[in-house]
Amino acid sequence: MDIGLSNLSLKFITLSFYSTSHSLLSSIPCGLTPPPAMCKSSSLIFVLLFAFLFRLEIFSWRLVFVITLISAGVVLMVATETAFHLTGMLMVFSASALGGLRWSLTQILLRKRNMGMDTPVATVFWLAPVMGFTLAFVSIVIEGWGNVFSLPVWETPEKTVRTLGLITAPGCLAFAMVLSEF
């Protein structure tokens, strides 16, 4: 839902509004570091909220102040946005909340050594198939795959290889980033 709502929000809000509200990169307390491609600055609030809720982080007014200060800066960045759309903004904030929940739940899973979830690689190994099948199912239901394979990007073998490379390369890069955390 985090990924889907983030992408769907682009139908309602401008890319400048989306990227401004997604541009802040920060290392989160309790070892959670969202990847830059998915980082929504408002997710900092939700990561901290869920970290307190699930007792991943000890409550600290200092942490609350820092996250509030960062969030206030983000609000000031987008306050003058002329192409404001409430539905798009709500989708971005919902995606941020779900992203914060996802990172907190991942942290809980990483603490369960008896389940074999003691490294980021093990987490990817167990969770990636579930996430992939879920996204595939939702995209089949909502978008339908019949149209995808009739696109011009599959017309020639050269275009097919290029398309597959453009699909595979970011996945390999993301996996390499996970490995570098290990």
Image: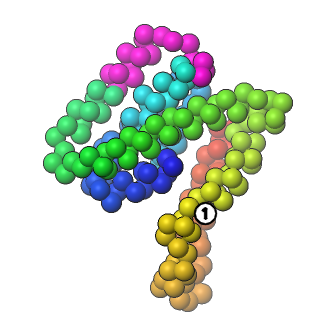
On screen, residue 22 above or below 83: above
On screen, residue 20 above or below 46: below
On screen, residue 77 above or below 17: above
Q: Quadrant of residue 114?
A: top right
The figure's colour scheme reads: rainbow
| Residue situated furthest top in the rendering | 61
Between residue 22 and residue 179, name the one nearer to us: 22
**Label 1 CA crowd tier, 10 Å (few <14, some 14–19, many 20+):** few
Q: Amino acid at mark 1?
A: Phe
Q: Position of residue 62 (x, y in %)?
A: 42, 11
Which residue carries the number 1 mark?
Answer: 137
Q: Position of residue 142 (x, y in %)?
A: 50, 66
Inspect this view and state whether residue 137 appears: yes
Q: Position of residue 72 (x, y in %)?
A: 28, 26
On whether residue 44 falls in the magenta region, the answer is no
Q: Quadrant of residue 171?
A: bottom right
Q: Position of residue 97 (x, y in %)?
A: 46, 37
On whether residue 69 falls in the magenta region, the answer is yes
On screen, residue 112 above or below 151: above
Between residue 142 and residue 164, name the one nearer to us: 142
| Residue situated furthest right in the rendering | 114
Judged left or right of residue 46, residue 172 is right
What residue is at 59 percent from the left and 73 percent from the top?
164
Q: Which region is colored magenta?
A: 54-70
What residue is at 55 percent from the left and 75 percent from the top?
145
Q: What is the quadrant of the C terminus in the image?
A: top right
Q: Quadrant of residue 161?
A: bottom right
Inspect this view and state whether residue 163 appears: no
